[in-house]
């Protein structure tokens, strides 16, 4: 069995234990099914399984890798939009999806996590939306095998002024997503700035699923309400299918009464959209950021991985195998 290549060829790998958990099978059964060539020894001594093999096993079980665009949106800042984007993207890659992140936030936080900061001449969304068919594989940057990003810089701060016209809002992000889908990307995950400006409206128009990360404070509840209203009016005005909308409790601290009360309020008032898995607060996120990776970069078990895995399984519809509900 080869050792993991530390040249970041394939840094995000599922362990056999994790796949066994998804299928509720034994680790030995998974190893047998994978065969020697698609297993890999991970740092820490765990056995990993290459994403291409995960994909072929899931496909054999009838899983459909149909193309989806997922946006994380809330005008409340610091609530976990970027964390949800990068965590979902790296997990989707581990589950065998060809994945691209579109970083729409001029802060460029998702790009920074992966150390992909565009130079002055490097294209960002602002440079490509008018002629997306001219995007090349050099425009989107490789993070890992089958994991790419269209990075962002301050230039994207100009988007709200150039996307003033409704026809541009309707087409800009969806045009780029269509080209990415034609290039074989199965999951496109958009990280949005903390606003509901024209660029975010354009992301809504392109999305199959909009996830609103939430927290216990009144600002994030207000952000959820405004986002829901905005989605309804945009889809009405543009005559678009309303995307699936979900709320994710992205910073849950069971020691805080405010967290408990906010989760109860969400269950009461938004039960139809609330994702039944919370993301607990933990320092694992900041530790992973220091290593310039997501929590899925390490094969060690921790609550952050556990919670974002439940989120990923739910959003990617992977739960048919463990008899839990999906989107
Ligand atoms: N569940 C969590 N537990 C602890 N820290 C978290 C959690 N989720 C996110 N964080 C941390 O909170 C900070 C803000 O998260 P993040 O950048 O994802 O928010 P954001 O909504 O994208 O912010 P912005 O609106 O500014 O783009 C980051 O330092 C991140 O590591
Ligand atoms: Mg962010």
Image (tube, rainbow, N blue to C red):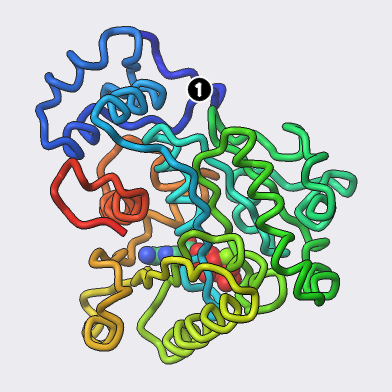
Dot 1 alpha-carbon crowd within 10 angstroms: few under 14, some 14 to 19, many 20 or more: few
Residue 41: image location, x then y, percent: 33, 17
Residue 206 coordinates in the image, percent (x, y): 60, 60
Q: Nearer the viewer, residue 283 or 162?
A: 162
Find the residue positioned furthest to the front. Answer: 239
Residue at the right extreme of this rendering: 121
Q: Secondary structure at mark 1?
A: loop
Identify which residue, 303 or 66, lies in the foreground. Answer: 66
**Residue 129 drawn at (x, y percent):** 79, 54
Residue 318 occupies quadrant: top left
Q: Is residue 16 above or below residue 193?
A: above
Q: How many marks?
A: 1
Frontmost residue, 297 versus 273 = 273
Image point (39%, 30%), residue name: 13
Does 233 sit left or right of 117 as displayed?
left
Position above or below: 140 against 35: below
Q: Which residue occupies 12% across, 19% down?
A: 28
> Quadrant of the image for the C terminus?
bottom left
Q: Position of residue 220 (x, y in %)?
A: 45, 83
9 w.r.t. 316: above or below: above
User: Under 8 Å from ligand 1: the CB of mark 1?
Assistant: no
Q: Is residue 208 left or right of residue 300?
A: right
Res. 313 in view? yes
| Residue of label 1 | 6
Quadrant location of the N terminus in the rendered image: top left
Tell me, yes or no, if residue 259 can be seen here. Answer: no
Residue at the image point whose x is 53% and y is 62% from the top: 71
Query: Where's ligand 2: which quadrant?
Result: bottom right
Residue at (74, 60) in percent of width and height: 172
Name the quadrant containing residue 161: bottom right
Q: Quadrant of residue 271?
A: bottom left
């Amino acid at each position: 069995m080869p050792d993991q290549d530390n040249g970041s060829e394939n840094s995000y790998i599922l362990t056999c234990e994790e796949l066994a958990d998804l299928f509720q099978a034994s680790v030995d059964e998974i190893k047998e099914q994978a065969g020697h060539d698609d297993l890999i020894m991970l740092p820490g001594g765990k056995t990993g399984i290459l994403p291409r093999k995960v994909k072929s096993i899931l496909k054999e079980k009838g899983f459909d890798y149909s193309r989806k665009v997922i946006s994380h949106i809330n005008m409340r800042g610091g609530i976990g939009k970027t964390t949800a984007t990068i965590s979902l993207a790296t997990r989707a890659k581990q589950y065998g999806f060809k994945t691209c992140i579109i970083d729409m936030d001029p802060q460029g936080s998702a790009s920074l996590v992966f150390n992909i900061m565009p130079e002055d001449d490097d294209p960002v969304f602002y440079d490509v939306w008018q002629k997306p068919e001219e995007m090349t594989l050099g425009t989107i940057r490789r993070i890992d095998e089958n994991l790419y990003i269209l990075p962002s810089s301050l230039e994207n701060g100009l988007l709200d002024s150039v996307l003033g016209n409704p026809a541009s809002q309707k087409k800009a992000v969806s045009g780029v997503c269509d080209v990415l889908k034609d290039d074989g990307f199965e999951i496109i995950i958009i990280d949005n700035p903390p606003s509901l400006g024209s660029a975010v409206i354009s992301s809504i128009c392109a999305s199959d699923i909009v996830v609103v990360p939430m927290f216990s404070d009144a600002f994030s509840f207000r952000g959820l309400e405004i986002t829901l209203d905005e989605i309804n009016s945009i889809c009405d005005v543009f005559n678009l299918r309303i995307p699936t909308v979900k709320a994710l409790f992205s910073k849950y601290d069971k020691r805080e009464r405010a967290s408990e009360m906010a989760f109860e309020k969400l269950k009461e008032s938004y039960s139809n959209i609330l994702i039944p898995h919370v993301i607990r607060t933990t320092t694992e996120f900041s530790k992973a950021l220091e290593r310039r990776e997501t929590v899925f970069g390490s094969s060690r078990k921790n609550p952050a991985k556990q919670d974002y895995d439940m989120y990923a399984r739910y959003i990617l519809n992977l739960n048919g195998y463990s008899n839990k509900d999906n989107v």
